[in-house]
Amino acid sequence: MSLLKLLIFHPILMLSAFFGTADGFYEYTFTECVYSTSDYSDMVYLDSYSFNKVVDVQFNSTVGKFVGYTEEGVKYAEDWNKDKADLEQWKAQVDAFCIPNAQIFDSAVRDKAVKPKVKISSVKQAEGNHPAVLMCSAYEFYPEKIKVSWLRNGEVVTTDVTSTMEMADGDWYYQIHSELEYTPKSGEKISCIVEHASSTQPIVEDWNPSMPESERNKIAIGASGLVLGIIIAAAGLIYYKKKSTGRILVPN
Ligand SMILES: *[C@@H]1O[C@H](CO)[C@@H](O)[C@H](O)[C@H]1NC(C)=O
């Protein structure tokens, strides 16, 4: 799957309007520009007219005319399709409306992809019959669309994987977490693969089963403290010994 396909989304660049009728009913119109390629070659302009959440009639620029979906809608479509010049204008919305807006949207928002920070951590160590659990977390990425998967010795793991939804951090960034349940075997290689619009290559994070860095740091700090304490104690002891011996040597 190419990365661009992952990016398929339906930007709603849109105008929505309610049209009141004399009877006090309202019609809801929804205009969309739908595309999934960066050259906009597949851009479709859609104009939908709904009543009570049901789409009655819709203009799709690929079809090139209005299509009715309800009895009412069919009548509207018949009527509106009579005006060929008008239909041409609707079709022209792809170039006149969709593409310029998509360019603005993409350069202002979509292209500002931010690469996730990826981290693997141990949630549970294997114990007896209970499998170990690893968690792969991707943080602070944008946009929301992302794919997280696990590789075990180069093969994609499909079972025993649970993933959260993308979660909004509340600051335009997102995070996601995926857990892998597995029975550790020596010599195996486990990696977390993250695919995101911010990177043309998948981001690969390998699991290092040895102690995590933070743990190593704690032990190193503790050990340094111990060594320093021993040195100071030893120096104090030597100093004390010297002083007390000196006192004996020098009579009053
Ligand atoms: C527009 O019409 C084309 C041709 O029928 C169809 O393939 C496409 O799915 C329609 N687009 C949308 C977004 O409905």
Image (cartoon, grey):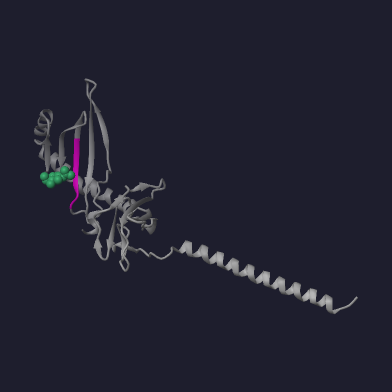
Magenta stretch: give its range.
Answer: 42-48
Q: In the displayed structure, does residue 237 sit left or right of residue 110?
A: right
Q: Position of residue 12 (x, y in %)?
A: 27, 43
Closest to the observer, 168 or 112 = 168
Closest to the observer, 141 or 220 = 220
Q: Residue furthest top?
A: 23
Q: Position of residue 39 (x, y in %)?
A: 22, 56
Q: Residue furthest bottom?
A: 249
Picture residue at 50% right of the left edge, 64% below the top: 217
Does residue 144 lie above or below 249 as drawn? Answer: above
Q: Position of residue 176 (x, y in %)?
A: 35, 51
The quadrant where residue 229 appears: bottom right
Q: Residue furthest right?
A: 252
Does residue 96 lie above or below 190 as drawn? Answer: above
Secondary structure predominantly adopted by residues drawn in magenta:
strand
Quadrant location of the C terminus?
bottom right
Picture residue at 79% right of the left edge, 77% below the top: 245
Q: In the displayed structure, does residue 71 sit left or right of residue 238?
A: left
Q: Is residue 61 visible?
A: no
Closest to the observer, 197 or 158 = 158
Q: Quadrant of ligand 1?
A: top left
Quadrant location of the N terminus?
bottom left
Q: Is residue 6 visible?
A: yes
User: Per the image, is 97 magenta?
Assistant: no
Q: Position of residue 152 (x, y in %)?
A: 27, 63
The quadrant where residue 251 appears: bottom right
Closest to the observer, 120 or 219 = 219
Q: In the displayed structure, does residue 161 sit left or right of residue 141?
A: left
Picture residue at 26% right of the left edge, 33% below the top: 17
Q: In the displayed structure, does residue 141 sit left or right of residue 19?
A: right
